[in-house]
């Protein structure tokens, strides 16, 4: 199992027991130790040392949790700009603050996108310290959603299947991935996505690890599977290319060798952890 997955980890103490007490949340916000997350260019701001930036409390209705005896809050932020530039910024984010970044980014994005009740259409209000919204008209309560995504490596006779999308940097290959659909188990989603995108049939699907992915709010579920053959039928509406790579090729890519046959996923992507796990196994 990978030991370190970027964005995963304990982060703040979310103290769920406080969320149902608005008076206690308000008292925490008035505390002299309370702090609010700084937002910049649509994301939580990161300083030169790779840490999140905080400031004195202002209009920050989202209660992220406790950092020791310091209550931590956030505003709902603003809409993100260029995602590629944001991904570049992640290379400077320290692993200790990454879980806080992920939680704040996903939670704020959900509030920006879900201001109205899905039952009756009335404007809803933030409740439970920002961990849900409630409709004052019909009483329905709505909770932040998480979209499950399977991301997987198919293996055949010591080689692993990777693909690339047109938006990837030149020569970057990564694990195939896709959203889990309604009425579908994880193993079924892995098998379906691999067949739809690359035309391979797989068995022996195994879970490896998971990662919260806050763009906007997915849970990446990493798996491996064994392919019954190596013939590929690439769905070019989803992928630009898909190829089988040997262990030596994967090792060279992970090492950043100039002679590597492809560029590996970045360190903050679970696809890289999945490749490291496969190589070590």
Image (cartoon, helix red, strand yellow):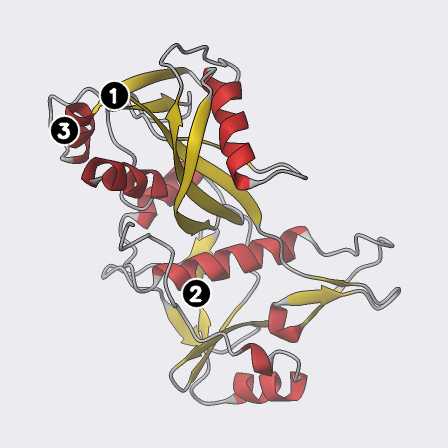
In the rendered image of this protein, does residue 125 appear above or below residue 121? Answer: below
Q: Secondary structure at mark 1?
A: strand
Note whether residue 114 is visible: yes
Number of the front mark, 3 or 1: 1
Q: Secondary structure at mark 3?
A: helix
- Report, in whole angstroms, how far the alpha carbon at label 3 lies from the one at label 1: 11 Å
Quick check: 58 left or right of 113?
Answer: left
Where residue 37 appears, as percent x and y from the top left, is 45, 68
Query: For the residue carrying disc 3, how many other residues have a C-alpha within 10 Å: few (<14), some (14-19), or many (20+)?
Result: some
Where residue 235 appears, as percent x and y from the top left, is 50, 14
Q: Could you say which is closer to the camera, residue 191 or residue 182? A: 191
Q: Which label number is shown at residue 252?
A: 3
Q: Residue at label 2?
A: 38
Residue placed at 44% from the left, 25% from the top? 202
Q: Which label number is shown at residue 245?
A: 1
In the rendered image of this protein, does residue 30 appear above or below residue 233? Answer: below
Query: For the residue carrying disc 1, how many other residues have a C-alpha within 10 Å: few (<14), some (14-19), or many (20+)?
Result: some
Query: For the residue carrying disc 2, how many other residues have a C-alpha within 10 Å: few (<14), some (14-19), or many (20+)?
Result: some
CB contact under 8 Å: marks 3 and 1:
no
Quick check: 153 left or right of 43?
Answer: left
Where residue 100 appears, as percent x and y from the top left, is 41, 64
Residue placed at 63% from the left, 36% from the top? 181
Q: Could you say which is closer to the camera, residue 138 or residue 17? A: 17
Q: Could you say which is closer to the camera, residue 48 or residue 171? A: 171
In the rendered image of this protein, does residue 233 appear above or below residue 95? Answer: above
Quick check: 280 left or right of 229?
Answer: left
Where residue 86 appears, as percent x and y from the top left, is 39, 44
Q: Farthest residue toward the left? A: 258
In the rendered image of this protein, does residue 19 appear above or below residue 271? Answer: below
């Amino acid at each position: 199992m990978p030991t370190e997955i970027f964005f995963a980890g304990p982060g703040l103490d979310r103290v769920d027991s406080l969320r149902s007490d608005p008076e206690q949340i308000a008292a925490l916000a008035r505390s002299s130790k309370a702090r609010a997350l700084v937002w910049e260019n649509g994301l939580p701001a990161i300083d030169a040392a790779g840490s999140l930036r905080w400031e004195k409390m202002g209009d920050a209705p989202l209660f992220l949790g406790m950092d020791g005896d310091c209550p931590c809050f956030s505003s709902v932020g603003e809409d993100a700009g260029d995602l590629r530039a944001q991904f570049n910024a992640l290379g400077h984010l320290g692993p200790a603050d990454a879980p806080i970044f992920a939680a704040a980014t996903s939670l704020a994005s959900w509030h920006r996108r879900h201001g109205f009740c899905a039952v009756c259409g009335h404007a809803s209000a933030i409740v439970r310290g920002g961990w849900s919204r409630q409709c004052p008209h019909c009483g329905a309560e709505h909770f932040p959603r998480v979209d499950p995504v399977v991301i997987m490596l198919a293996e055949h006779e010591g080689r692993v299947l990777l693909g690339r999308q047109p938006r990837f940097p030149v020569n970057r290959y990564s694990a195939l991935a896709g959203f889990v659909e309604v009425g579908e188990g994880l193993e079924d989603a892995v098998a379906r996505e691999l067949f739809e995108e690359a035309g391979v049939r797989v068995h022996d699907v195994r879970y490896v690890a998971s990662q919260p992915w806050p763009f906007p709010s997915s849970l990446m579920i990493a798996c491996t599977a064994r392919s019954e053959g190596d013939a590929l039928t690439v769905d070019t509406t989803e992928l630009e290319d898909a190829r089988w790579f040997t262990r030596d090729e994967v090792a060279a890519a992970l090492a950043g060798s100039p002679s590597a046959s492809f560029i590996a996923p970045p360190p903050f992507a679970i696809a890289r952890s999945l490749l490291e796990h496969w190589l070590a196994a």
